[in-house]
Amino acid sequence: MPISIQELSDEVVEVKLSGKIHSSDYDEFVPGIEAIIERVGQLRLLMIMEDFHGWDLGAVWQDTKFDMKHHADFAKLAMVGEKKWEELMAKVCRPFTGATIRYFDKSEEAAARDWIAAD
């Protein structure tokens, strides 16, 4: 599965992305994350991108719809990646969420975990 979800605490959720994301991958991701939002409220999201190759066109559309619907449901977003384009993606995401976004290189994953958990 190119997208996996793990609850780290009541308000911190880790999402791992790997490979290429297709629109069908959102069939499990969206209900899973929405159930957590409904139960917990606003979340802090730790996004780990490992060997990540981006989205196909259908997945881009699914992601855009998700982001618009859940604009206010995330307080913080820590993005951990391995590639320069992933760092740029953190900047592109800003208009689609009310969350505070910060990018971390893979070598800084421990710092990302500390930042996402801090108040």
Image: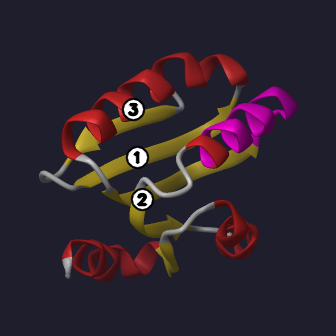
* Residue named by callout 3: 34
The three-letter amino acid code for the residue at tag 2 is: Phe
Query: Residue 51: x percent and y percent?
Result: 59, 50
The three-letter amino acid code for the residue at tag 3 is: Glu
At horizontal 33% and vertical 51% (from top left) the residue drawn is 14
15, above or below 44, in the image: above
* Residue named by callout 2: 74
How many C-alpha atoms fall within 10 Å of the one at disc 1: few (<14), some, or many (≥20)?
A: some
Q: Which residues are magenta?
A: 55-67
CA gap between label 1 and label 3 equals 13 Å
CA gap between label 2 and label 1 equals 13 Å
Query: Residue 15: x percent and y percent?
Result: 40, 46
Query: Residue 86: x percent and y percent?
Result: 68, 66
CA gap between label 3 and label 2 equals 11 Å
Classify residue 58 by image quadrant.
Answer: top right
Lower sequence index among marks 1 and 3: 1
* Residue named by callout 1: 15
Q: How is the image coloured?
A: secondary structure
At horizontal 52% and vertical 44% (from top left) the residue drawn is 17
